[in-house]
Amino acid sequence: MSTNKDAGYRPRLTDEESEMVKNHRALKIECETNGIPMSDVNHYWYKGKSFSLHVKNNGVSLDKVRQDIIKAMNSHSPSYPKIKRTKSETGHLLVIDPADIHIGKLATSFETGEDYNSQIAVKRVKKGVNGILQKSNGFNIDKILFVGGNDILHIDEPHRKTTAGTPQDTDGMWYENFMTAKKLYIDVLETLMSVADVHFVYNPSNHDYISGFMLSDSIQSWFRKSKNITFDCSIAHRKGFKYGQNLIGTTHGDGAKLADLPLIMANEFSREWADTKHRYVYTHHIHHKSSKDYHGITVESLRSPSGSDSWHHRKGYGVGGIKAVEGFIHSKDHGQVARLTHIF
């Protein structure tokens, strides 16, 4: 007499159990075909012909982004031959300051009346920089100050939020936007180095306080072999650059009050302040133009090429404002002698 324990006995599966086994086999084949580990499948639907899989979002690690950067750097082999240039007593400094680019911001004309995304951001910055260079013809440019940072990136973490956690409407993934911004800076700086030696200054900002700093460090590493570009990529919120009789300060504008900047600059850059006659601070953050003379210094905010997203449009901020990339010409002896604006 046989029992359930007899060799060769297999309990009969119910119809429901048979269907589960069949689905499991089909799932295994589906995962192998698409290169997806079965362990990454949270749940799925199968109706006999097709699958709908919900796969774990493991994200992209910082190490993966770092390896992509190293791979790109190695493939490009960025070894820049030194460009020999003669010093000029009558030269000028060209300041190019693409402010508040916000790569990754999303605005749609359906809601706000204008489109803005990562592709538009890149096109505007390149057109703006080339426009400023064309407008600077006629001046003997012997140095370029390029101001980076200042919300070059729109978000600072994978959940599409700023550093402080404010949700944003976004275009593209955070790592795609990081690589887009990196390539944009490289392209622009290579163009500028063909004109004159460049000093790159980085301003930390509120949308991308973490990733913006990493981006600037990545750019500095990229040009590590170039003798025609220098960098100031510290996390300091205010930077100072001396050119002839000019002290040029830059800051994002979300920190110290504008009226306090003159005294702060005089303290933080006391030696440069004492050695100069013409002093300026270029600020950002508010996306529109303002300029005011204080005792011994001019504080000026810059326009942005970026569009207004849903929240800003709803609040009326920036509506109808001029979208532009701005630049300035500084004489060694006479200070700011020209303003250059490329309007979109």
Image (cartoon, helix red, strand yellow):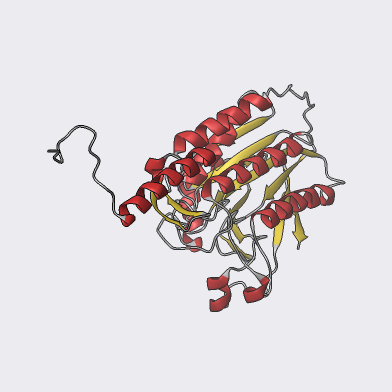
Percent of width and height locating residue 149: 56, 48
Can residue 223 be seen from the camera position used here? no
Can residue 107 be seen from the camera position used here? yes
304 and 139: which one is in front?
A: 304
Q: Quadrant of residue 240?
A: top right
The outermost residue toward the front is: 1
153 and 174: which one is in front?
A: 174
Residue drawn at 16 percent across, 35 percent down: 6
Asked whether, in this view, residue 16 is left or right of residue 142, the answer is left
Asked whether, in this view, residue 113 is left or right of residue 208, the answer is right
Residue drawn at 64 percent across, 54 percent down: 118
The quarter in which the C terminus is drawn is bottom right
Figure disc tally: 0
Percent of width and height locating residue 144: 71, 40
344 and 10: which one is in front?
A: 10
Does residue 296 lie above or below 310 as drawn? above
Residue drawn at 56 percent across, 64 percent down: 286
The quarter in which the N terminus is drawn is top left
Percent of width and height locating residue 113: 68, 74
Percent of width and height locating residue 308: 61, 68
Q: Quadrant of residue 117?
A: bottom right
Residue drawn at 58 percent across, 55 percent down: 104
